[in-house]
Amino acid sequence: MTERIPQTGQRTSTPPLRLGQLVLDTETEQVGTLEAIIDQHELCLPRTEPAARWPRVAFLRPQGGGYEWYARPENIALPLDVP
C-alpha cells in the first residue's frame, strides 16, 4: 500500500518529500532513495532520453546499490512499510 505525493499547490496532510528519503516509483514499483528533483531546463540529457521531455525529473538510487534511475515526480509515493 502506498501514499501518493500530491502535485505542487494541492492541499494535503501528506508530508513533503525530503532528499535522502526512501520512496516508491509507482511506475516501476522500485523503492529507492530520492536524490534530487530537477526542472527539465536544468538537465543535460540527450533528446533520445525519454526523461528529457518531462517538465521535472526525480533521480532515485536503489537501496543497497545499483543503477540510479529517473522517475516522474508525480509517480513518486511514500511506501507505507518504510520509515
Image (spheres, rainbow, N blue to C red):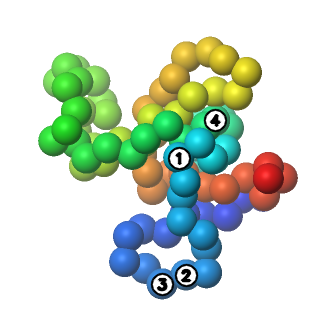
Q: Which residue is mark 3?
A: 11
Q: Can residue 22 be seen by looking at this rendering?
A: yes
Give the number of callouts.
4
Q: Residues within 10 Å of mark 4 (few under 14, many from 20)?
A: many
Residue 41, by quadrant, is top left
Say left or right for 12 vs 65. Answer: left
Q: CA distance from mark 1 to mark 2?
A: 19 Å
Asked if the residue at tag 2 contacts the one at tag 4, i.e. Cβ–Cβ closer than 8 Å, the answer is no
- Name the kind of residue labelled 1 in the image: Leu
Q: Which residue is mark 2?
A: 12
- Name the kind of residue labelled 4 in the image: Gly
Say left or right for 14 vs 36. Answer: right
Q: Mark 3 or mark 1, which is nearer to you?
A: 1
Q: Of the two numbered discs 4 and 2 on the same chain, state the one appearing first in sequence.
A: 2
Say left or right for 10 vs 82. Answer: left
- Name the kind of residue labelled 3 in the image: Arg
Residue 77, by quadrant, is bottom right
Asked if the residue at tag 3 contacts the one at tag 2, i.e. Cβ–Cβ closer than 8 Å, the answer is yes
Q: Which residue is mark 4?
A: 32
Callout 1: helix, strand or loop? loop
Q: Quick one: 61 or 26, which is closer to the camera?
A: 61
Q: CA distance from mark 4 to mark 1?
A: 11 Å
Asked if the residue at tag 2 contacts the one at tag 1, i.e. Cβ–Cβ closer than 8 Å, the answer is no
Q: Which mark is residue 10?
A: none
Q: Residues within 10 Å of mark 1 (few under 14, many from 20)?
A: some
Callout 2: helix, strand or loop? loop
Q: CA distance from mark 3 to mark 1?
A: 21 Å
Residue 48 vertical placement versus 32 (above, below): above
Q: Which mark is residue 19?
A: 1
Q: CA distance from mark 2 to mark 3?
A: 4 Å
